[in-house]
Image (spheres, rainbow, N blue to C red):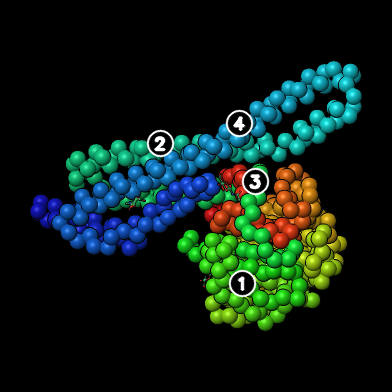
Amino acid sequence: NEALEVNSVPYKFIVTIRPKEGWQVYSSAQDADGRCICTVVAPEQNLCSRDAKSRQLRQLLEKIQNMSQSIEVLNLRTQRDFQYVMKMESQMKGLRSKFRQIESNRRTLLTKNFQELKGKMNDLQPLIPVLEQYKTDATLISQFKEEIRNLSLVLTAIQEEIGAYDYEELQQRVLGLEGRLRNCMNKLTCGKLMKITGPITVKTSGTRFGAWMTDPQASPKNNKVWYMDSYTNNKIVREYKSVSDFVSGVESRTYNLPFHWAGTNHVVYNGSLYYNKYQSNIIVRYSFESGRVMTQRALESAGFHNVYPYTWGGFSDIDLMADELGLWAIYATNQNAGNIVISQLDPLTIQVLNTWNTEYSKRNAGESFMICGTLYITNSHLTGAKVYYSYSTKTSTYEYMDIPIHNQYFHMSMLDYNARDRALYGWNNGHQVLFNVTLFHIIKTDDES
Ligand SMILES: *[C@@H]1O[C@H](CO)[C@@H](O)[C@H](O)[C@H]1NC(C)=O
Ligand SMILES: *[C@@H]1O[C@H](CO)[C@@H](O)[C@H](O)[C@H]1NC(C)=O
Ligand SMILES: *[C@@H]1O[C@H](CO)[C@@H](O)[C@H](O)[C@H]1NC(C)=O
Ligand SMILES: *[C@@H]1O[C@H](CO)[C@@H](O)[C@H](O)[C@H]1NC(C)=O
């Protein structure tokens, strides 16, 4: 009887672990650009050896160690952001006290100075909720650290007396922790735009107007670049295997599209090019793999052919883009008085899934880009352009903001966010440029991931 029980332990263990499903490891590292990288590690399949159990334990320990490292990375990143917040906070406090000081003897001051200061204060107001959210995040991370440390201790103890622990429970705890870590990472990758830095000039080529991009849905190894020069009278897409091939001009393929495009606001998403067919409000999905148009669909009511372009014109009426949440079209309609309309699109059918009406005139917008379901709009395509307005599709609310963007070559005809690279791709007067973005992560509700 006793022997039977002893023998049943490893059996039960193997069944419970189910290596095919249970052993995904979500770890994270930080590259030079401060981006979090998540990796999935598949386990060894063959567990049927005599010391399978201790091997499992070793793996568990290793896994915990890996997760601890991930937490460290998150923590590091958080701390870096935290310093930024702290700086902002102290700046705010400084302003506030100055403000009070001035208010107390404002009779001696010119109204103009007073107003100026008041304006500055108002600009900083939106930071307050972000700061508060931030603090919750920091707490979350220290909780994770605590839990992992705890689990490591438990595991070490178990390793010393193998068999004295309920593996099923242990496994559950590890899986639970993994899930929470994954959620935590998802939360940290989405956020509110705080700052745009750069640009770096990747290449100088083409006309004043054009588009270049990579596929945010592609695997990390696939870094293909697509290049579409000019806003009209063209249907040649050039493909490069990598950014360095793009820089040195080594083309890998060209695609001759069946229809001309309009504007520069195309997007490559999950292996397909989405673009606006010339002189229409039709959106075309062209598959690079098959070299064929898979779908065409009119974007109902959308203005086209310079009815509602961005400030620079160029048939930029319909702007297609992708972010963490999927595919979007930005355009304007008569029904919304020429103001910007946001529609989320089904990537397969190009059908509109949901629509939001903003109150920002499309013809007064320089460019726009979407990050984590929030549309950011610049006020100009010329020198001095800044991100001036944002609209959250999550809350259906807007906000004025003031985030400068360095328009190095004085004319911006394309600006799009790439969620994989966490960068803005721009076409700046015949220069292909990249901007870094600083996002502030905000704790999200559970209905998102
Ligand atoms: C832990 O991370 C290392 C290096 O990234 C990897 O080789 C190893 O397989 C990971 N261990 C487990 C159990 O996932
Ligand atoms: C650590 O583990 C013990 C024993 O399982 C548990 O009672 C305690 O709540 C854990 N602490 C944390 C922070 O998870
Ligand atoms: C982004 O920032 C990293 C360092 O923080 C820098 O190495 C990189 O060149 C920057 N990229 C751009 C496009 O500015
Ligand atoms: C990307 O395309 C593949 C098939 O090519 C499909 O299975 C997958 O669902 C697509 N992903 C998204 C986010 O559309």
Whichever of callouts 1 and 2 sits on the residue coming sooner in the sequence is 2
Q: CA distance from mark 1 to mark 2?
A: 51 Å
290 is higher (above) or lower (below) than 165: below
Q: Quadrant of residue 447?
A: bottom right
Q: Which residue is mark 4?
A: 86
| Eye-nearest disc, 3 or 4 | 3
Q: Which amino acid does the dot numbered 4 rest on?
A: Met
- Mark closer to the observer (1, 2): 1
Label number found at residue 383 = none
Q: Measuring 29% from the left and 39% from the top, which residue is drawn there?
A: 154
Image position, residue 96 (x, y; %): 73, 26
Label 2 C-beta lies within 8 Å of the nearest ligand 2 atom: yes
Q: Upstream in the sequence, badge 2 or badge 3?
A: 2
Q: Is mark 1 within 8 Å of ligand 3?
A: no
Q: Residues within 10 Å of mark 1 (few under 14, many from 20)?
A: some
Give the CA separation, mark 1 to mark 3.
28 Å
Which residue matches tag 3? 197
The residue lying furthest to the front in this view is: 248
Amino acid under label 1? Arg
